[in-house]
């Protein structure tokens, strides 16, 4: 299929209206068959549950064009499972995991012309989301729901691509963290909007959130997990019940150990340890792996010596291996790649 006339190598991380999206409705205790539709607009009652009580969940994944021309997704089964967890936490009817995968396949195939070509540096971002749609004025779950998937081609999440970014230690706690307790996915990003706007106004790319109890342990940023590399080449990832269980982070841990032979530690990371790490990065579906050069702690800078000017050597190996797996240039572990076409 002929691709859209887009300057793929120079697009940012934003929304473009693609040709098609997927929609399915839940009513009278069951989901309908779902369909591919062309209308990007949604009309709802003013009292819909999503407006009154924010009863909505979402996921995020990507489609890639491999070197041999296939279109694939990276571990979408984990997104399907995580969305079930999120829905159950908000008393929403889970969208069946097998149907989630089929819906992803349908909407990506329908928008094949929007999937960036191999080597362009761009990908097709896939956003499944679900919301309560019938009028609800008392504090209770909705009875009817809409599940949709939109797609949009995107470039790098952070400006500058592989150039290290500077982030700040946030003065805010996350009042509604993305992974607190039994919340398994991204239920509420809204609480991080004010801190991220403030960070951008001050010239920083992101916030580092510390644990709200003691403010001594590293958690995550507003939209990504942290990874750290010690001076002896050990990958360290923060462990906390209030951190989103990132699919990218979990995959990086496997890549580090199985592909690169690195030692891997998933544990609590104390803020006063940061000065001893050689490299730092942010990871997630949108960010992939983005290097962090400096962390600003209220005017005091913590610099990572191996990543001040460019992506550090271990972070680069992790990035190259992970993206190689996603793009089909490196053989993937069994079950990691879902072929669309």
Image: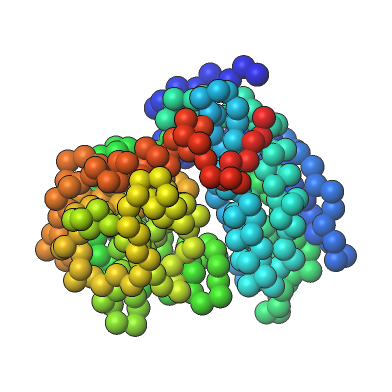
Q: Is residue 240 visible?
A: yes
Relative to 57, is 326 on the left or the right? left
Q: Residue 235, position in %: x, y?
A: 31, 57
Residue lying at 84% horizontally and 53% vertically, measured from the top left:
32
Q: Residue 2, position in %: x, y?
A: 62, 17
Residue lying at 29% horizontally and 82% vertically, measured from the top left:
214
Which one is nearer the viewer's eye here, 42 or 249?
249
Residue 249, image quadrant: bottom left
Q: Is residue 114 above or below residue 152?
A: above
Q: Is residue 55 above or below residue 317?
A: below
Residue 102, image quadrant: top right
Q: Residue 89, position in %: x, y?
A: 63, 72
Q: Is residue 173 above or below residue 22?
A: below
Q: How is the image coloured?
A: rainbow
Q: Residue 243, position in %: x, y?
A: 43, 67
Placement of the C terminus among the 4 image quadrants: top right
Placement of the N terminus among the 4 image quadrants: top right
* Residue reaching furthest to the bottom: 213
């Amino acid at each position: 299929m002929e691709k859209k006339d887009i300057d793929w190598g120079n697009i940012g991380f934003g929304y473009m209206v693609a040709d098609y999206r997927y929609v399915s409705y839940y009513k009278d205790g069951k989901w309908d068959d779902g369909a591919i539709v062309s209308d990007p607009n949604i009309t709802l009652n003013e009292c819909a549950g999503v407006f009154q009580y924010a009863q909505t969940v979402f996921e995020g994944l990507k489609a890639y064009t491999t070197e041999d021309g296939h279109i694939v997704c990276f571990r979408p089964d984990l997104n399907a499972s995580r969305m079930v967890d999120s829905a159950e936490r908000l008393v929403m009817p889970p969208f069946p995991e097998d149907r989630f995968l089929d819906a992803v396949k349908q909407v990506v195939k329908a928008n094949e012309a929007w999937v960036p070509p191999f080597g362009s540096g761009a990908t097709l971002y896939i956003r499944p989301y679900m919301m309560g749609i019938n009028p609800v004025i008392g504090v209770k779950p909705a009875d009817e729901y809409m599940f949709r998937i939109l797609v949009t081609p995107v470039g790098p999440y952070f400006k500058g691509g592989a150039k290290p970014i500077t982030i700040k230690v946030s003065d805010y706690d996350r009042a509604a963290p993305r992974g607190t307790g039994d919340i398994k996915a991204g239920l509420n990003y809204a609480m991080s909007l004010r801190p991220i706007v403030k960070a951008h106004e001050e010239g920083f790319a992101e916030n580092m959130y510390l644990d709200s109890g003691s403010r001594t342990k590293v958690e995550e940023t507003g939209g990504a997990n942290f990874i750290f590399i010690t001076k002896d080449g050990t990958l360290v990832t923060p462990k906390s019940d209030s951190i989103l269980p990132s699919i990218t982070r979990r995959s990086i841990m496997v890549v580090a150990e199985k592909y690169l032979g690195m030692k891997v530690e998933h544990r609590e990371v104390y803020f006063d340890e940061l000065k001893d790490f050689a490299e730092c990065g942010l990871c997630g579906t949108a960010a992939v792996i983005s290097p962090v050069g400096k962390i600003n702690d209220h005017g005091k800078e913590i610099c990572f010596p191996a990543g001040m000017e460019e992506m550090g050597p271990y972070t680069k190996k992790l990035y190259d291996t992970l993206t190689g797996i996603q793009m089909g240039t490196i053989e993937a572990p069994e079950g990691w790649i879902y072929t669309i076409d």
